[in-house]
Image (tube, rainbow, N blue to C red):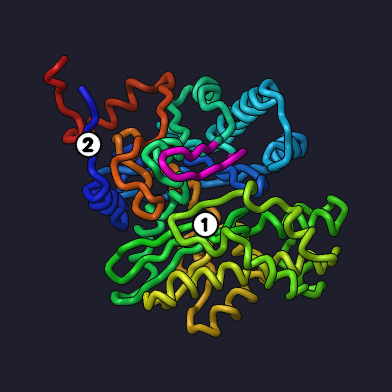
């Protein structure tokens, strides 16, 4: 037997049907999936548990765990575009991250009564090199087989490789999920956007007809975090509440120069990472240091985001009423205030996604939990915004001790997805 796969157009309709606003129902009627995300900022692990059945989905529980200091240091070093690592060092990091993921996830699960059937572990992005003609490459470290072994649970990973194998950018993927939340954020006839201010900033624009434009806009928090660490001699990993930026002065000449970087001028589909935006780019563009360096990094994020909306959405005469912000940047009051002020000049309202009833801290982890279930069903995870034009393989599945039980649950939830293979 095999699990049917759908065309991209059919998959879009399938995804919508799967995620209608859930009514009260027993959480164990479907599959309980735990999405695990460690983002580009490397500030910690987010785990979000959701229940998915044939009628919809609902959040169950979520929590986060900080990165161990030494492991975080190794990850940040490996992400440095100029780093040279021996193959053994890469493999050791892959192993050690997998061991850490597995141990942490096992402890998190033990603290909750509702246990997941499935783990969807994004992994830690070490490098991301999108390219044309199916030449793109990406690496998410953290051996998922160790997660499956330590937890005993079936694990889905390597979510981006399939999209790249079919000619896509491999990112952003979360627009699938954003599109499904958007119906609850705006009135009919209005365009809206969900914006993730993570280490890398990405936007999802949802038009009134539900068409999607999505891409990475550039640095979100990565330069702000690095500037804060430099300004405090390593005492701060990020600019809490934007206090450092507020105490500094923006080097606007540097900001104007930086927004001319080639990536900002590219048209989507496009995605990026630390490889395109090493911290040295900011340091070479300005002589400011201390709080003023943090302020300049913050202003660069704001200006690059605002210009992305202006050039690629508003200048194309696409309606945009509101931007709903998720990710760590949504908790930076100065960053949010500056962005709201900047976009207010073009008539666009900005607010944290949490103001609309969704907890923005867990959106990405929830999305990958959902993608884990879709991967079991053989559904593609990218779309037109990644540049993919045909079916792309979803995440890789590593069966755990519970594989047979999970397969039975999947068959009960979606019997139409299975059929006998006539060639068997």
- Label 2 element class: loop
- Total marks placed: 2
Instruction: State yes or no: residue 131 in magenta.
Output: yes
Q: Quadrant of the N terminus?
A: top left
Front residue (pair 171, 118): 171
Residue occupied by mark 2:
414
Q: Is residue 115 visible?
A: no
Circle 2 crowding by C-alpha within 10 Å: few under 14, some 14–19, many from 20: some
Where is residue 310 drawn, in percent x and y? 49, 75
Where is residue 93 drawn, in percent x and y? 67, 28
Query: What is the quadrant of residue 134 in the picture?
Result: top left
Q: Which residues are magenta?
A: 125-138
Q: Residue at x 27, y 26 (%)?
A: 408
Which label is found at residue 216?
A: 1
Q: Can you name the residue that lies furthest to the right here?
A: 233
Q: Is residue 12 above or below residue 394?
A: below
Query: What is the quadrant of residue 334 in the picture?
Result: bottom right
Q: Is residue 277 above or below residue 90?
A: below
């Amino acid at each position: 037997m095999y699990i049917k796969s759908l065309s991209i157009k059919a998959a879009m309709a399938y995804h919508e049907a799967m995620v209608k606003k859930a009514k009260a129902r027993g959480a164990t009627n479907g599959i309980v999936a735990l999405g695990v995300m460690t983002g580009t900022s490397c500030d910690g692990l987010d785990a979000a548990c959701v229940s998915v059945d044939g009628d919809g989905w609902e959040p169950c529980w979520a929590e986060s765990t900080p990165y161990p200091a030494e492991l975080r240091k190794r990850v940040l070093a490996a992400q440095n575009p100029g780093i040279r690592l021996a193959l053994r060092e890469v493999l050791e990091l892959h192993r050690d991250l997998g061991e850490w993921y597995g141990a942490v996830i096992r402890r998190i699960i033990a603290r909750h009564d509702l246990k997941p059937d499935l783990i969807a572990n994004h992994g830690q992005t070490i490098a991301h090199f999108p390219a044309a003609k199916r030449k793109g490459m990406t690496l998410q470290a953290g051996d998922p087989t160790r997660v499956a072994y330590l937890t005993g649970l079936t694990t889905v990973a390597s979510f981006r490789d399939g999209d790249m194998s079919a000619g896509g950018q491999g990112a952003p993927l979360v627009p699938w999920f954003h599109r499904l939340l958007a119906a609850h954020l705006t009135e009919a006839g209005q365009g809206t956007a969900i914006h993730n201010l993570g280490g890398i900033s990405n936007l999802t624009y949802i038009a009134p007809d539900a068409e999607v434009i999505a891409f990475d806009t550039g640095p979100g928090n990565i330069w702000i975090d690095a500037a804060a660490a430099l300004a405090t001699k390593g005492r701060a990993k990020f600019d809490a509440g934007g206090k450092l930026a507020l105490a500094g002065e923006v080097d606007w000449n540097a900001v104007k120069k930086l927004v001319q970087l080639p990536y900002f001028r590219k048209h989507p589909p496009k995605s990026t990472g630390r490889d395109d935006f090493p911290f040295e780019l900011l340091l070479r563009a300005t002589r400011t240091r201390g709080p003023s360096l943090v302020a300049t990094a913050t202003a660069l994020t704001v200006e690059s985001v605002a210009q992305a909306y202006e050039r690629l959405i508003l200048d194309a005469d696409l309606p945009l009423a509101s931007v709903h912000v998720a990710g760590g940047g949504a908790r930076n009051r100065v960053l949010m205030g500056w962005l709201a002020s900047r976009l207010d000049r073009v008539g666009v309202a900005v607010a944290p996604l949490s103001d609309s009833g969704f907890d923005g801290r867990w959106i990405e982890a929830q999305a990958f939990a959902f993608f884990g279930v879709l991967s079991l069903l053989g559904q593609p995870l990218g779309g037109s915004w990644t540049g993919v034009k045909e079916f792309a393989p979803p995440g890789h599945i590593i069966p755990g001790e519970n594989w047979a039980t999970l397969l039975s649950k999947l068959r009960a939830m979606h019997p139409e997805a299975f059929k006998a293979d006539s060639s068997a």
